[in-house]
Image: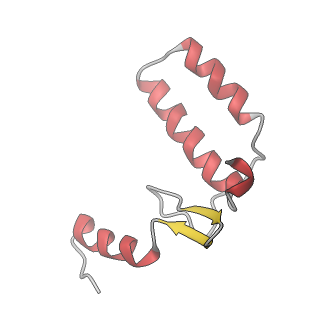
């Protein structure tokens, strides 16, 4: 699947950072070892323009074309409901 993820460095780092935060609260040496191995597969990157703070959309190449999950329109709607702003 990795070859189909168009933004693997950014998305992968977002996933591994979420794992790292979970391990700070609940350490698990076996899973931390797995995390260290996963991180060797990803380049160091700074969050890109797709980073929403709480999520990095997955950009996936499919046979039907490229997808962005979640879709930007859905995120705007979610932001308004979660943070009390106006929805469009």
* Residue at the far top in the pictured view: 29
Q: Could you tell me which residue is drawn at 23 percent across and 69 percent down?
A: 81
Q: In this view, does 13 lie above or below 58?
A: above
* Residue at the far bottom in the pictured view: 88
Across and down, in percent, residue 24 comes to 47, 25
Across and down, in percent, residue 23 comes to 49, 25
For residue 67, what is the image quadrant?
bottom right
Across and down, in percent, residue 57 comes to 53, 62
Task: Judge from the rendering whether residue 79 lies leftward or rightward of residue 44; answer left or right.
Answer: left
For residue 65, what is the image quadrant?
bottom right
Task: Judge from the rendering whether residue 18 lies leftward or rightward of residue 35; answer left or right.
Answer: left
Q: Could you tell me which residue is drawn at 45 percent across and 30 percent down?
A: 22
Task: Judge from the rendering whether residue 29 lies leftward or rightward of residue 10; answer left or right.
Answer: left
Q: Could you tell me which residue is drawn at 26 percent across and 82 percent down?
A: 87
Q: Could you tell me which residue is drawn at 54 percent across and 68 percent down?
A: 68
Q: Is residue 7 above or below residue 14?
A: below
Q: In this view, does 87 lie above or below 48?
A: below
Residue 9 or 53: which is nearer the viewer? 9
Residue 20 or 66: which is nearer the viewer? 66
| Quarter of the image that includes the C terminus | bottom left
């Amino acid at each position: 699947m990795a070859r189909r993820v168009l933004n693997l460095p950014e998305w992968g780092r977002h996933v591994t950072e979420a794992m790292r935060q979970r391990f700070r609260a609940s350490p698990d040496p076996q899973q931390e070892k797995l995390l260290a191995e996963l991180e060797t597969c990803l380049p160091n990157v700074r969050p890109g323009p797709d980073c929403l703070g709480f999520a990095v959309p997955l950009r996936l190449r499919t046979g039907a074309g490229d997808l962005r999950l979640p879709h930007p329109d859905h995120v705007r709607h979610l932001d308004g409901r979660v943070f009390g702003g106006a929805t469009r």
